[in-house]
Amino acid sequence: MRYFLVLVILFSNCNFNKKEVQFSGNWKRVQMTSELFDDTIKYENPIELLSFRSDNLVFYYQNLYQYEFNPDYDSLYLQYLDSVGTRSYVRVFKVDFVDLNTMNFSYVRKLVDTVSLKPVDMIYTVTFEKDLVNE
């Protein structure tokens, strides 16, 4: 019993702070995977689709958004500049860092089955690599 109390006190005093994630630079899409069809597309000539700027601004598909990152859920939220603070998001991504220069974005696209007319969630995972040449 005494050892149990020591463990409880020890773990209650620990702070498990996640490291601060800093998004910066230009990122190129190199691969996209669809889980529903188990299909992977590798891009021979990757194009720049993400460009993180200061003040939590990001260019995504050549449109300017403000982003918010929640490290507790590894989620990145994009919102229009005029809707900041309203929790009205354009896109929500699950972010998985493979290494410092590679990250995966996963997101759900809602589709409708044309035969049964039932909704289907298609999960895409897009792999981005940091553009180290144009940084």
Image (tube, rainbow, N blue to C red):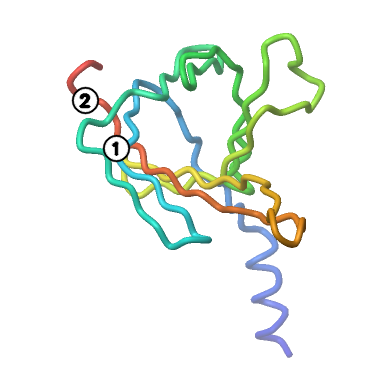
Query: As drawn, which residue projects farthest toward the bottom?
Result: 1
Residue in front for this viewpoint, 113 or 77: 113
Q: Is residue 22 left or right of residue 122?
A: left
SS of the residue under disc 2: loop
Tell me the kind of residue under disc 2. Leu
The residue most toward the right is 86
Q: Is residue 103 above or below residue 25?
A: below
Residue in view at x 26 percent, y 31 percent: 46
- Residue lying farthest to the top in this orientation: 82
As drawn, 128 above or below 4:
above
Residue beneath the point at 77% across and 56% down: 117
Q: Is residue 126 above or below residue 40?
A: above
Identify the image quadrant of residue 78: top right
Point 45% across, 29% down: residue: 22
Give the left or right position of residue 103, taking residue 16 as reference.
left
Q: Residue at x 72, y 79 (%)?
A: 5
Circle 1 crowding by C-alpha within 10 Å: few under 14, some 14–19, many from 20: few
The spot of residue 130 in percent (x, y) is 29, 31
Q: CA distance from mark 1 to mark 2?
A: 8 Å
Which quarter of the figure is the C terminus placed in?
top left
Q: Position of residue 10 (x, y in %)?
A: 63, 67
Query: Helix, strand or loop at disc 1?
Result: loop
Task: Give the x, y percent position of residue 102.
Answer: 32, 41
- Identify residue for label 1: 101
Say which residue label 2 marks.
Answer: 132
Circles 1 and 2 in contact, beta carbons < 8 Å: yes
Residue at the left extreme? 133
